[in-house]
Amino acid sequence: MINKDLSVDFLGVHFENPFCLSASPVGNCYEMCARAYRAGWGGITFKTISPNSEKIDEVSPRFNELSKEDTPFVAFNNMEQLSERTVEENCADMKRLKEEFPNKVLIASIMAATEDGLTKLAQQVTEAGADIIELSMSCPQTSNAKMGAEVDEDPELCKQLTEAVKRGTDVPVIAKISPNLASMVPAVKGCLAGGADGFSLIDTVRSVSNVDLEKNVALPNINGKSAVSGLSGKAVKPIALHFLQELRSASGLEQLPIAGIGGIETWEDAAEYILMGATTVQVTTAIMQYGYRIIDDLKNGMMHYMEEKGVDHLSELVGLANKNVVPTSQLDRDYKVYPKIDWDKCIGCGRCFISCQDGAHQAMGWDDEKRLPTFDKSKCVGCQLCALVCPVGAIKLGLVEMKPGRKGDPAKVDASSQRLHNYDSAED
């Protein structure tokens, strides 16, 4: 059995592993968080609390899932707001959790419409034993201008709200940033000016996930009406990784401490976040599908990955991929990689033929007699759409050639697989 050290230090706080619950329905009370700790999660972010004066009244139903063909939960639409329980009830639960699980990390998520409200909440959760405070100012379900996703559009307001939290605590403060922005850099710089110690990203993406074609109402249907709300799940992972890259490549932000959130269901997802610059990761949607027990798969998979990479400490992986994401103008355009078909695997479904004919450059043809695809190298541009649509992995990256008039050694081109974890890269 492989046993690697998954512990990380984030903002001076020691995590036994980087996997945490994000602020959401999965960490709503003592009983839920205690079960997560016992299951092996390194930390929990307690569901966001707000002052008692800000009454939370939820709708029903409030969830919807986006599917693709027979695949459910490609994305998850969530209209749930903040904790409906009182600050006193939540703080009592947090205090009990910290007393019973002193070596586990407790992150308190807070939100308020006023600076005084934030300062007081920060004081209360600090007294309850929070190791870190997460300032939530990016919730797409909240319409208040000083609480919802609009906050991140105003760097000066970001600064003021962060300062308000810092006035009430001596523990690290992380700001949770909305993805509903053209760039996160101004908001992040505003929070840093206010004293933020780190960041968590991304929050959910503003969305309408489905529309009922019979009733003409978006889903979930709440007595004939719906609303724009937050999307999470696997579909938002590319958006989160983009913002990780943006921040970790921005001048002066290259070492920014970040907790990654969005579409983390497997250890591979978590590893991608870490390689793109996250130190810890937070999970919700996958827990709602599979329960807290997925932590075993996350930890075991990550340890096997570390063994494969010859890495002893998880921190050695943080940000390794950032330097390899460059402007498109800097990409190597001197060569072309042709597809290679494994005829023993090919099932003759015709997916590659249809996609190439209607979506690419007509290099793939069709032999009606053999009921198999054909390949015309002279028409191929090396886009590899055929490999991506093949349902059985019968098409891989094959021959590498330099373009006419270009110099270089094809043998030195990294023509690795475009389909991670599904099949091995092809040889020339």
Image: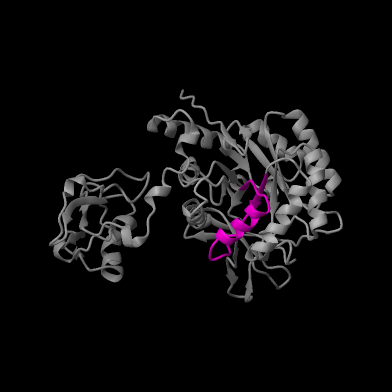
User: Which portion, as a residue range, is magenta?
Assistant: 173-198
Q: Position of residue 391 (x, y in %)?
A: 34, 53
Q: Position of residue 146 (x, y in %)?
A: 74, 63
Viewer-closest of 261 and 243:
243
User: Residue 270, relative to residue 57: is it above or below?
Assistant: above
User: Residue 230, relative to residue 393: is it above or below?
Assistant: below
Residue 325 seen? yes
**Residue depicted at x 50% and y 43%:** 270
**Membership of 164 in magenta stretch:** no
Q: Position of residue 40 (x, y in %)?
A: 62, 32
**Residue depicted at x 56% and y 38%:** 294
Residue 48 seen? no
**Membership of 178 in magenta stretch:** yes
Q: Quadrant of residue 80?
A: bottom right
User: Residue 115, relative to residue 94: is it above or below?
Assistant: below
Task: Give the total number of marks visible in the rendering.
Answer: 0
Q: Quadrant of residue 170?
A: top right
Viewer-closest of 189 and 231:
189
Determine whether, in the image, residue 312 is placed left or right of residue 285: left
**Residue depicted at x 49% and y 48%:** 254
Viewer-closest of 254 and 9:
254
**Residue depicted at x 59% and y 46%:** 283
